[in-house]
Image (spheres, rainbow, N blue to C red):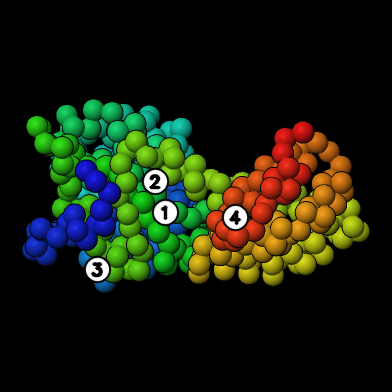
Amino acid sequence: MSERNETEEHKTLSEEEVGRLNIGFIGAGKVGCSLGRYFAERGHEYGLCVKGYFSRSSKSTKDAAHFTKSQAYDNMKALIRECNVIFLTVPDGSIQDTWNQVKGYDIKGKTICHCSGAMSSLDAFEGIGETGAYGYSIHPLFAVSDKYNAYRELPGVFFTLEGGNILSGNAEKEHSPEFISLCRTMKSMGNPTRIIEAENKTTYHCAAAVASNLVCGLIDQSLQLMYRCGFSQNEAVKALAPILVGNMAHIADTDPTQSLTGPIERNDTITVQKHLQCLQSEDEKELYRILSRRLVRMAQSRHQDRDYAKMKEILADK
């Protein structure tokens, strides 16, 4: 199936065909609690009902149920029986083992979801076609860092969707009415969605990791340089905060190329040479060169009349 907006893919079903969503969570960690609270608060008016939680820890189960004003289930079977959409919000390494337990119950017609960014529904739910259930990965493009507060930041977050059942002899995927209803509900709640193919999941997750995780490494490098100038950690973080926030805001409004400033963009070879001289280790110099070479390509596309040959020579591998 080609990558298309969910509105185009789901327009054939009438509102009468879309049933009520009774959602259950197996796993009561950060993602499960955050999605559950968000769905409970924002999705109720659209017919979305968070039924409750089951996890190996009864305390975690009760805490999550209390947090979302839902039910704490003492066994997996009861939760599965009462829910038509079941989220496996366990660590990535436990998804397949949890699925092996879930598929032992009657799940025909049910929609089974996980929230891993890197794992496809095919990888997670082996043999799901034989159960009569539908399998999906539903990943919020957002770093869920806090169990009880991150839900407040979910409005407007982009969700990437993947999965569905392949119809025999047909290249198209069949989607459950519950999945279609969930897509519509998320759109109504203000969350854009996009369906991608299973083979693109790893590349998609790598993109997310670069934007979320690798950026942290670059900021840490910047902080280390600030410390050498005599800044304390607190001073350095506060000093850099406006430029970090401002730059991200500009990128979100336009794109990285149009937001680019600094010595690379203005072809200031003298300053770049000084930067390389002040860096103390070869690792620091290598990181600076690799990223700066990418910036040169971006700057060249923006200023096609400028000659960046000298800059490229300075940034070449040594």
Q: Residues within 10 Å of mark 2 (few under 14, many from 20)?
A: many
Question: What residue did someone put label 3 on?
Answer: 46
The kind of secondary structure element at disc 4 is helix
Disc with the residue nearer the chain's start (1 vs 4): 1
Viewer can see residue 64: no
Disc with the residue nearer the chain's start (1 vs 2): 2
Query: As displayed, is residue 113 above or below residue 131?
Result: below
The picture quadrant where one finds residue 14 is bottom left
Query: Label 2 near label 3: C-beta < 8 Å?
Result: no
* Image coords of residue 267 (percent x, y): 71, 58
Disc with the residue nearer the chain's start (1 vs 3): 3
Query: As displayed, is residue 165 above or below residue 295?
Result: above
- The amino acid at mark 3 is Tyr
Foreground label between 1 and 4: 4
The picture quadrant where one finds residue 263 is bottom right
Q: Foreground: 52 or 238?
A: 238
